[in-house]
Image: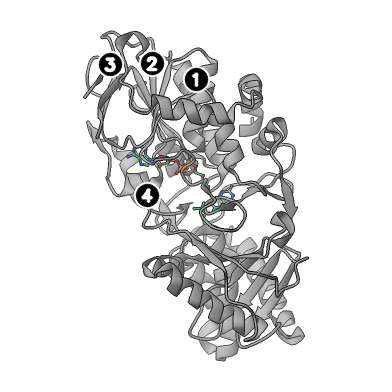
Amino acid sequence: MKRRQALGATGLGLGSILSMGMAPALAQLQRASDRQPVHAADAPRVIVVGAGIAGLAAAQRLRAAGQRVLVLEARERSGGRIFTSQAWRGPAMDLGASWIHGAGPANPLTQLARRIGARTFSTDMENAQAYDGLGGELRAAEQRRLADLRGRIGELLAERELEARDVSLQALVYEALDYTERPAPQQRLIDFLLNSEFEHEYGAATRQLSARWFDAGSAYEGGELIFPDGYKALIDHLSTGLDIRLQHEVREIDYQGAAGVTVRTQHGSFSAPQLIVTLPLGVLKAGKVRFSPALPSRKQIAIEHLGMGVLNKCCLLFERAFWDTQLDWLNHLPPTGRAGQWTEWVSLARPSGAPVLMGFNAADHGRRIEAMSDAALAQDAMAVLRRMFGSQIPAPQDVLVSRWASDPHALGAYSCHVLGSHPAQRDDLAQSVNGRLFFAGEATDRQHYQTVHGAYQSGLRAAQELLRAGGGQQARAPVSHSA
Ligand SMILES: Cc1cc2nc3c(=O)[nH]c(=O)nc-3n(C[C@H](O)[C@H](O)[C@H](O)COP(=O)(O)OP(=O)(O)OC[C@H]3O[C@@H](n4cnc5c(N)ncnc54)[C@H](O)[C@@H]3O)c2cc1C
């Protein structure tokens, strides 16, 4: 049975909770509960670490099953890698996830968005124009060469599934296309394809991505939906009625005591019989949270070997649009020596009605730009846009940027399959420990990792596992909060 059928069959019954539409009340509830100690009488049966979409989905599932749930979140907001910012003069901007990928009827997020009446807008990757970093639109002859190379790489990847030997994606493509024998202009086209088609999608450099496993998951059918008012609509809805303690950074998870699990935060300790960990892979890799006893070795190996990629956004608000506002994607072929820089742009003019461009940088350059100031980054972006559209274009009125690799509560954008990793390691990461610790988060979903729907499904899966394991029945000692 496939994952989505299994979820349907478990009768998750979230419909009633999710259609309550109590987002404003929720914000108040969150604030009110922020500093309240937990008393034994209303002590949690389950603690959920992290209020990203995986943690919220898990908490709602448990709440629907009658469990008392406490969510501990390090940031001053819920949503994690879903982050709708309004900290500028332009429309709401998603600096983390933007799209429901594969937004057909089978995707649980499509269903959720419909149920709660969130406004969505369809964008199309084929609705694109390619530009030459040497100036203007990409010439027809170059476009044909690109299409030809893209086709050859596609064939190559279809064939490589038969091979047992793993190499990096870059090594595979370079060798098969005789990269080193080709003139620089052709190398530039190959490097552009490697960056725009793979590094932007999977987050890691193609010299690190496993040719065998980089796309080991699966996708739902359907197009791409963006939220003009922000992905936050889903987060607000899923937070409804939950006890979420913001600015509670978990530093230690002790699961050896008789009472169950004790977590330590800067505001004291919390205990419960069972706990769901939804920490991002980047945070687990950095060892920022100490587990006592140490996690089983298979889980540690998974944490070490799976990769954490980087994707960053730079949003620019202009007084007027200088590009074709009917386009969704503007692809930019950087000059030689600037491979991987600003290769993809999205026009948000159609979904938002405002003259906004969102520039992307992934993998190596995505990491590099995090050291730059907002102003320096906007300047760098404008130098590229001037080569694409001419020197007369206006300066931006405002800028919003993300820095996911240096964000201490994410330490990267999403997980990926680098050399040395294996899809089964996602199952190891998801595996529960001692019937007490359960694991969710995008990196634990073998089929839909890297995505919001994968994270959401993983939260429901972990909650279901916990309930099956006898949610809360292991509690013996009273559970409480101590400062
Ligand atoms: C730039 C970017 C673009 C993306 N675009 C898309 C897209 O268009 N479509 C798509 O489907 N996916 C996209 N993704 C991926 C998607 O955002 C993630 O897969 C998903 O949001 C992960 O959810 P999660 O609940 O697993 O993790 P998170 O959202 O990271 O939640 C984990 C939570 O744990 C908290 N936390 C961390 N450390 C601690 C601690 N010590 N104590 C307590 N709490 C802690 C974090 O603050 C966070 O709130 C994108 C991601 C990025 C960064």
For the residues labelled 2 and 4, say whether their Cβ atoms are less than 8 Å apart: no
Q: Which one is nearer the viewer's eye here, 131 or 180?
A: 131
Q: Which residue is found at the position 56% from the left and 54% from the top?
A: 215
Disc 3 versus disc 2: nearer the observer: 3
Which residue is label 3 attached to?
480
Disc 4 residue type (three-letter): Gly
Q: Quadrant of the N terminus?
A: top right
Q: Bin the neighbour count of mark 4 within 10 Å (Cα to Cα): few under 14, some 14-19, many 20 and up.
A: many
Residue type, numbered disc 3 = Ser
Does 56 sit left or right of 274 as displayed?
right
Residue 64 to residue 461: above or below: above
Mark before the other along the chain sequence, 3 or 4? 4
Q: Are marks 2 and 1 in contact (CB under 8 Å)?
A: yes
Secondary structure beneath label 2: loop
The residue that disc 2 covers is 45
Q: CA distance from mark 3 to mark 4?
A: 30 Å
Q: Is residue 94 left or right of residue 372?
A: right
Which of the two marks, 3 or 4, is nearer to us in this view? 3
> Which amino acid is tagged 1?
Leu
Q: Is residue 132 visible?
A: no
Q: Which residue is mark 1?
A: 62
Q: Is residue 354 above or below residue 300?
A: below
Would residue 109 appear left or right of 184 to someone viewing this image? Answer: right
Q: Is residue 201 visible?
A: yes
Residue labelled with disc 4: 282
View extreme (bottom): residue:
183
